[in-house]
Every structure is written in C-alpha cells, then in structure tokens.
C-alpha cells in the first residue's frame, strides 16, 4: 500500500558550512533530475554505493528508485536550487518489517558539507514514524566517510565483517548521545551560517540609488563611510557609478565573487533579485526592502516565497523590512545598515527585531559609550532569528554579553534551551515587548504566546535570561556586564559624599533584596584621597561583594577632579564589580574609562548612572544572574519504576477510541496513567492543599506549574512555572518560588511539610508531561502536603493528539 505523500518530511536544513539545502521525499517525476545527478557522480562514489562500476542508470533502475510507497520503501533527496545533490533511502525486509536496509549517495562536489549526517537524522525519524526500529548498512571498508557518518550519529551501533563488506546495524531509538550529537551539529551549522553573513569578503548593494536619501544609497554610503575592508559593488539598472563607485546593471555582471547582498529594491522585484543572487553564488541576503508580511496576507505570502527561494539556493535571509547588520571587527568594519551612527568596538552582541527602533537603539548605544561586537536587526524575522545569533555568540570570542530586543519568539522552547546553555558562559539581557497582550507584530513568522506574561518571565529566569522592563534598563545592565566582573554574592558597600544620595541607594538596595554593609558617608568635602581609602577598604573586605560609589559636587565650592582617576586605578583588575553615580552622568564616561587600544572603554571601566536607584537596580539584576550561574544545574533523576511504553500505549488506546478530538479521561484512567510514573492517588489526609498542573503549551512544550490550592492563591495568581522535564534542583526551586511558600516551610511555628515528597512528585509529573506530549493538560488538585508526604487527592486529565513531534526530539530543520 502506498501512503500519501508525506509533506511533513519536507524540511529546509542548514549544512555544516552554513549553507542551506531542501530535503523532501522523492517523487516519480524526479526521474530526470536523478539521471542528471547520477551523471555528475565520480566512479569512486558510484562504486562505494553499488560495489561495482555502473556508468549510468537504466530506465528500469530510475523507475525503481523514484517509485516508493513512503512506508516500506522510503527515499529522501536533498536539493539546492533545481539540482538534486544527495539521496538516502531505506527498504524494509519482507520477513523483518522492523528492520530496513539504508544507503546514501552524496554528490562529490557537496561531500564534506554534512549532508550525510542530516539525511541520516531525517530518514531515521521517518523510519521510526513508520515502525522501523533498526537500520542495516553495508559499507566497503575503505569508505571511511560513510562509516564515520553512522558511527558518529550517536545511535547504538553493532558491526560484523563478512565477504569484504562491513555490515553496520543501527538501533534507531534516540539516545542521550544521539540527541547531544544532533544539538552539537545544529549549533555548529547555525553558528557558521551567521558567521558567513557577518564576515563577508565582498558586498553588493542591489538597488543602490543615486538619490541621496533613498534606502539603497544610504546603505551604500554607510558601507563606504565605515571603511568596509572588502570591495563594495553598487547594482543599478542604468547608472555607470553610484557614490563614486562603479556600478553594475545586475549582480550577475559583477566580475568577482559576491558573499553578501543587501537588497533595497521594491518588494515586487525582490524575488527576481534572489534568483540572480543564486546564480552568482551569493551566501546571504540582507533584505531592507519593506512591503512584505507587515502589509497583510499577500505580503506574507510573498515573504514566505522569498525565504523558500533563498533557502532552496543555499542562502540565509536577514529581514525583510530590517535595518541591516554590522560587525565592528577591524578586519571587516561592516556597516550594512541604514543607521548613520554605529557604536565603536566593544564586547556586546545586539539583536533587535525592530527595524524602526534600530536606529534609535544604535544611537543610544553610542551615546552611552557602549561598544558592540556585532549587531543584527531582523525586521520581520522571516528566517534569521535571535536563536541563530545566540548560536553564533556562544563561540564568538569578541562577545562577552548578549542584548536582545524581542517582539516575538519563533521557537520559544529552542530559545530557552539555547539561552540556558549560553547563559552559563555569557549573560543574556532581554527586553520582550507585548507584556499586556503577548501578541505578535504583523509580519512576524511566529505565533502569539498563550502563557501569561509572568509565566514567560519565570521561564526566562529558569534559562538564566535577565529580563528587564525597558530599553533604559537594558543599557543600564549591559554597561555593567560588559566591563565589570560578576559579583560573588548580594552584599554591597555604598560609598558617598552626600547623605541624601546614600540613603536613596540604601533604600533601593533594601527594596531589591540586596544586603547593605554599613554605609560609608565621606561627607561633602571628601576628595580623591578619602575615596581611594574607602574604596580600597571595601574591595579588600571579604564581607563585600560589590561597591556602589556615589559622587556629587558640593553645593558650595569646587570638587576634587582626581576622584575618578583614583577610582579607576583601584577598579582596574579588581575582582568585585563597581558601579557609580558620578556627577549625574550616564554611560561609560571618559573619566571612568580604562581605555582600550582605540580609546573605547575596555574591561575594568566603571559604568555611571544618572541616579543611585538606577545603579543599584542594574546591580540587583546582575546579582540575581550571578546567583543563577552559581546554583547547581541539577540532574534528571532516574525513575526506574516509570513505564513510558505502557503510558504511551494507554494514551494511544484512549485517543484511538475517540472521534479524533480531545479526550477527557475518567478518574480511573487518570489514576492508571499516573501509576505508570509511580504516582499513586489516595483520598483524605490533612496538611496544606497544593495544586500541580502539567500542560502542553503550543510554544514552549511541556510546562509545569505549582501553587497552593486555595482562593487567595488563585486571586493573586500565585503560581510558579518551569519547563519540563525538571531536574532535582529545578523542582526544589519551583516549590519555593511561590509567594506563599512560607506556609510550606513552617510559617509561624507550624510543622514544615515534606518538601522532598513534593519535589519528587513534580519531577514525576514533569517527566510524564514531557515524554507523553498527548497529555494536553493534567491537573492534580488537591495535593495534600504535610510532614508525612504528599497525597494526590484528585486528578483531571485531557488528552489531544499533538500537531507534530517536539522540535528538540525531531531532526534538525529550519522553521
């Protein structure tokens, strides 16, 4: 029986060198491109595949290879443009339908780009979907490249040698190793794709108008004015030169290679430009043109076609409707943006979705004296996203901190996964707009978030993201993270020459949960000597983790202008962060700066804030982040009594007996499913009533919430949220994250509840929700917690068929 064409297997993928390809099931009409593909193969590649010379394929062989049933016989091909560049297929054994023979062919010119690995991921996922549990591959001993593809995939591999051929047997059940391998390959490929955009050797500006204030002319002027280190090629249909630089009528007429194309033509001409860029071998596109998704359904369709075309030809797209990209590396000096002001070199990577806000953001960054490593404005974010940039910045030695201005989240669960990993090495500061609506701007390829905003904040915090309220706070925190070390704790010393300023700082610190050491008020006549002594003492004090230095001129008379020099001298090389409110100035002031090679702020420079409260608030954000980094990551506890297969079988049976819609399970069914994960229900019991919910969120996947089960908690919406599956450390944090947690900890002399029992229950519920995505919502209410344990008194269960596998469990693919 031939299954319908499985369009869910189609995917755009990023290859190991940063290029892209399209994967899809083979079709009968692919006969000709298969024939042409085969004709381009070397005799060696053909021999490795068929174990004998075979100069061409017969018509019968072509028909055999292109006729599949998408079940017992499956084939996927990789295309770039109109050409087929690779194929993988499996054929199930008649007597062993759970076992299939698998074979690959990759065109010689595209070998070494990671096509074999990504094809194996996708064909394995398709096989599991069709009930195939293992692959058998016959490989010649000297075909080391293909042997390596199988061995490095992370699956359980068996091997035997017979009649000069190595037979490999792969168990297709995903393993921790196979998932880690897939994640590592995704990281390298997506990082490389961004690196190709940010480090071009040459740039073409397509639509480089001679009109001074036009979009294309502005980008061209900024590229030239920024002293881009490579050649810049204006493309104009009639002009001989633009801005004094020789122009070309088409990108195809440029005599040399073009790495990056900035597209500034009307929206209806962009698709034609993409075709020309593909013909030229351009690596990436920055589409500053508007008139796409932000204009409505027609524009959205055009935007989707733009991305489809670009990826099909191996290109990533920034935009459309974006401000552009910039790289301050002195070996590149790329300003491919519409912004007239670009900050100097510095340790901060900045991603902004908003093109409209981009110019203002860059101006404010420069005004603060905050240096950038790289900047990307994604506009409608049709392709390149903040997730891609985080992959790149994780390994970028020039980036110490990451700033994000987000209007939507295309893949929130992947964002949380990447942020959690990146945040352990480099801080991430984010502004997420749409707090009140959780809506998505018109034109963005993303869905609205369904969780309440405070839940999103909790999930950000779980991943270590410093979520701030607005752009001012973003810069406040960034200038501290960029140039000062992280604090070891929350104990701060305040040094001031104004009692009023000192009290403001002290009140702000107390309100933000910081511990203030005895304040040092030096008096209005304090000068450099007094500040130097006080600061030296605070830095040497083991009971101080950070210092707030406040300095304002006295109301009468002058002030000692040597104060900042002495502060900087002590700060340079100090292991504790110092923030200042110096004369009410804001930013990285020259007086408080450790100068870098080009005069910009270097590590050890002290950030200044307009008001003491701003300085303390920024420090409080950083303290909380440092504490997150210091906390143990935790581990996923082993649950030897959990029976995932039985749980999956029960859920499949209950859903199969329905009409295809949601199934509201009976109390008996809910109890039976819970028992599969070692969770028993029992009525009665006293103690504190709590409520545990596991839900399958459309954006984040498995989410667990916890709170007390009473009217007051419901009225205050006092619930804490975490992504599943929970580690033991995360379960402990979740129990203590609600405001009413003291009622569980022995408030006013009451006996504390058995926290370990609650934490164990949360671990099991989160694992159930994560491993069985059909569990749309599971509510345990009440869970009675007392000193003897946690008893589940009631359960409500709703089951639904998920739209598809969770992205992190499926093969790599672009959205």
Image: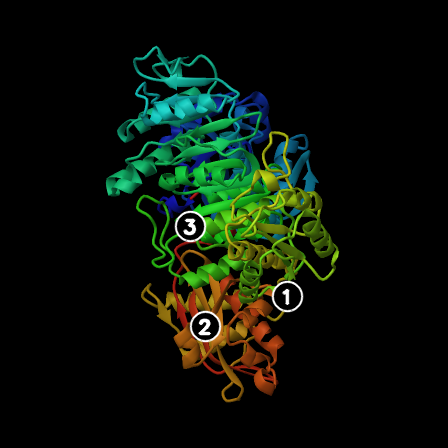
Marks 3 and 2, how far apart in space? 25 Å
Q: How is the model colour-coded? A: rainbow
Disc 2 is placed on an element classified as loop
The x, y position of residue 175, in whole percent, is 60, 53
Which of discs 3 and 2 lies nearer the camera? The answer is 2
Residue nearest the observer in this picture, 460 or 278: 460
Using a 10 Å C-alpha cutoff, classify the residue at mark 1 as few (fewer than 14 neighbours), some (14 to 19) or many (20 or more). Answer: few
Out of 59 and 27, give the one closest to the viewer: 27
The residue that disc 1 covers is 638
The answer for how far apart the CA atoms under marks 2 and 1 are is 30 Å
Q: Position of residue 382 (x, y in %)?
A: 38, 40
Identify whether 637 is placed above or below 332.
below
Q: Residue at x 55, y 68 (%)?
A: 734
Using residue 312 as the reference point, say whether residue 19 is left or right of it. Answer: right
Which mark, residue 33?
Answer: none
| CA distance separating discs 1 and 3 | 32 Å
Task: Give me the residue at 63% from left, 35% from top.
Answer: 595
Would you call the spot at circle 2 few (<14 residues within 10 Å), some (14-19), or many (20 or more)?
Answer: some
Which label's residue is closer to the chain start, 3 or 2?
3
Q: Which residue is mark 2?
A: 718
Residue 289 seen by the camera: yes
Q: Secondary structure at mark 3?
A: loop
From the top left corner, tell me how far across and down residue 59 is, in percent. 41, 26
- Residue 74 shows in the view: no
Q: Quadrant for the C terminus, please.
A: top left
Residue located at (40% from left, 40% from top): 360
Quick one: label 2 or label 1, which is nearer the N terminus? Answer: 1
Which callout, 1 or 3, points at the residue further toward the start of the chain? 3
Give percent across and percent down for residue 722: 51, 63
Question: Residue at label 3?
Answer: 409
Depicted 464 relative to depicted 209: above or below: below
């Amino acid at each position: 029986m031939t299954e319908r064409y499985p369009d869910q297997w189609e995917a755009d993928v990023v290859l190991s060198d940063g290029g892209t390809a399209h994967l899809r099931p083979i079709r009968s009409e692919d006969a000709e491109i298969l024939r042409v593909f085969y004709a381009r193969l070397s005799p060696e590649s053909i021999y490795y595949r068929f174990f004998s010379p075979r100069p061409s394929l017969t018509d019968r062989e072509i028909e055999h290879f292109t006729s599949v049933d998408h079940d017992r016989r499956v084939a996927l091909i990789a295309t770039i443009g109109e050409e087929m560049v690779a194929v993988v297929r499996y054929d199930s054994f008649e007597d062993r339908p759970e076992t299939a023979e698998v074979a690959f062919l990759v065109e010689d010119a595209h070998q070494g780009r990671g096509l074999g690995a990504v094809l194996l991921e996708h064909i394995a996922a398709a096989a599991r979907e069709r009930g195939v549990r293992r692959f058998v591959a016959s490989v010649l001993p000297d075909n080391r490249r293909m042997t390596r593809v199988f061995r490095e995939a992370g699956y359980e591999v068996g091997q035997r040698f017979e009649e000069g051929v190595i037979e490999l047997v792969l168990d297709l059940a995903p393993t921790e190793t196979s998932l880690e391998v897939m994640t590592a390959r995704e990281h390298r490929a997506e990082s490389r794709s961004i690196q190709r955009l940010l480090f071009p050797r040459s740039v073409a500006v397509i639509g480089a108008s001679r009109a001074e204030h036009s979009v294309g002319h502005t980008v061209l002027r900024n590229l030239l004015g920024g002293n881009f280190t490579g050649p810049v090629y204006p493309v104009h249909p009639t002009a001989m030169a633009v801005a004094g630089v020789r122009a070309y009528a088409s990108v195809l007429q440029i005599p040399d290679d073009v790495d990056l194309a900035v597209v500034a033509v009307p929206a209806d001409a962009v698709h034609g430009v993409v075709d020309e860029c593909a013909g030229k071998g351009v690596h990436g596109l920055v589409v500053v043109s508007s008139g796409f998704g932000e204009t409505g359904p027609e524009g959205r369709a055009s935007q989707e076609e733009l991305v489809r075309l670009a990826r099909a030809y191996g290109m990533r797209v920034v935009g459309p409707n974006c401000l552009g990209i910039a790289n301050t590396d002195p070996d590149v000096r790329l300003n491919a943006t519409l912004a007239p002001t670009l900050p100097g070199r510095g340790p901060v990577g900045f991603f902004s979705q908003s093109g409209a806000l981009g110019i203002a953001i860059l101006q404010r960054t420069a005004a603060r004296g905050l240096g950038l490593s790289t900047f990307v404005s994604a506009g409608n974010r049709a392709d390149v996203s903040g997730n891609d940039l985080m992959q790149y910045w994780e390994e970028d030695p020039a980036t110490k901190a990451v700033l994000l201005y987000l209007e939507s989240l295309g893949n929130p669960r992947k964002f949380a996964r990447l942020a959690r990993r990146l945040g352990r090495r480099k801080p991430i500061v984010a502004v997420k707009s749409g707090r009140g609506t959780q809506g998505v701007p018109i034109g963005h390829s993303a869905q609205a978030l369904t969780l309440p905003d405070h839940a999103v904040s909790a999930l950000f915090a779980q991943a270590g993201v410093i979520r701030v309220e607005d752009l001012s706070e973003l810069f406040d925190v960034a200038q501290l993270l960029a140039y000062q070390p992280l604090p070891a704790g929350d104990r701060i010393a305040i040094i001031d020459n104004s009692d009023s300023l000192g009290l403001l700082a002290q009140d702000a610190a107390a309100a933000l949960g910081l511990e203030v050491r005895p304040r040092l008020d030096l008096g209005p006549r304090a000068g450099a000597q007094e500040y130097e002594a006080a600061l030296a003492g605070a830095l040497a004090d083991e009971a101080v983790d950070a210092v707030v230095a406040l300095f304002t001129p006295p109301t009468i008379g002058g002030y000692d202008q040597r104060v900042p020099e002495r502060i900087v001298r002590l700060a340079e090389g100090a292991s504790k962060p110092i923030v200042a409110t110096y004369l009410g100035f804001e930013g990285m002031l020259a007086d408080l700066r450790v100068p870098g090679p080009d005069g910009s702020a270097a590590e050890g420079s002290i950030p200044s804030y307009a008001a003491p409260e701003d300085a303390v608030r920024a420090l409080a954000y950083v303290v909380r982040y440092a504490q997150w980094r210091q906390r143990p990551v935790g581990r996923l506890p082993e649950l030897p009594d959990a029976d995932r297969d039985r749980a999956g079988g029960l859920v499949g049976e209950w859903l199969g007996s329905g009409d295809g819609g949601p199934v509201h399970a009976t109390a008996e069914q809910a109890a039976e499913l819970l028992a599969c994960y070692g969770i028993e229900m029992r009525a009665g019991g006293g103690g504190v009533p709590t409520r545990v919910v596991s839900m399958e969120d459309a954006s984040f996947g498995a989410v667990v919430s916890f709170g007390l089960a009473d009217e007051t908690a419901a009225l205050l919406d006092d619930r804490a949220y975490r992504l599943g599956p929970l580690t033991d450390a995360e379960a402990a944090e979740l129990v203590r994250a609600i405001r009413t947690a003291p009622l569980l900890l022995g408030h006013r002399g009451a006996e504390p509840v058995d926290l370990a029992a609650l934490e164990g229950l949360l671990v099991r519920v989160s694992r159930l929700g994560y491993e069985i995505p059909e569990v749309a919502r599971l509510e345990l209410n009440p869970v009675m917690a007392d000193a003897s344990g946690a008893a589940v008194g009631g359960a409500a269960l709703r089951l639904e068929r998920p739209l598809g596998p969770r992205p992190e469990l499926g093969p790599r693919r672009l959205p």
